[in-house]
Image (cartoon, rainbow, N blue to C red):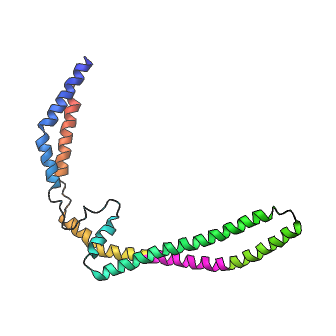
Amino acid sequence: MKKILLTSTLFLLLFSCQENKPADTDIVEQAAKNTESSFPIKRMSKSEAIIDGIYSEKIKDDEKLKDLNNRFLSLQNDSKIMKDLYDDITKSSENYYSDAERRTKNIMDSALQKEVLNLLKNSSEKYDIKINKLNALKIQINLNLMRLTSFYDAFKIKKTLPEIENYQETHPLETDSLENFINKQNQLLNELKNLK
């Protein structure tokens, strides 16, 4: 008995859905109407941030903005290269001192061990002076990069904000289609509630 009731209910549900299909399609088509844009916001890469995508489109025909963008990207890339280069140098030096100290502790002759430890200490202290200055410069480079990025992001937002506002103007958020769709959902919901 339960199987017959379930089968009947599914049959009615499928039949009622098929009857309303043209109306549902009309609602969806109405909602999709006028969603084309003169500005290619929709076809931008999924991995690209929307501001960057709009900005890329905006600067295509502006040589000054292209030059500014290229200089910014170049500095950003060079900052990473400089950081990686100096990180490699400092890591190599730190690894050397660490390895040398470990090996020195294994020297059996105590006088020789003391002599080598003193040599390492003097060299390490000279290195620390150099590295302190280097670290201060690296901090300044990172701060400058953060400031450059924040100012450039602010510039991009100012440049792209009119485009998204224009996009919103040409794509008004009309609620008629959504309300009609909700009515269709509610009709079927009421129908299903009343099925016995």
**Image location (x, y in percent) of residue 192:** 22, 32
Which secondary structure type mostly characterizes the magenta part of the structure?
Answer: helix
Viewer-closest of 114 and 134: 114
Camera-nearest residue between 23 and 74: 74
Q: Quadrant of the N terminus?
A: top left
Residue 170 image offset from top left, x and y in percent: 18, 65
Q: Nearer the viewer, residue 120 or 131?
A: 120
Name the residue rendered at 29%, 69% in the picture. Answer: 54
Q: Position of residue 189 (x, y in %)?
A: 22, 36
Q: Quadrant of the C terminus?
A: top left
Query: What residue range appears in magenta?
Result: 130-148
Residue 116: percent from left, percent from top: 81, 71
Most distant residue in the bottom direction: 64
Q: Residue at x 23, y 31 (%)?
A: 193
Q: Is residue 71 left or right of residue 30?
A: right
- The image quadrant that residue 194 belongs to is top left
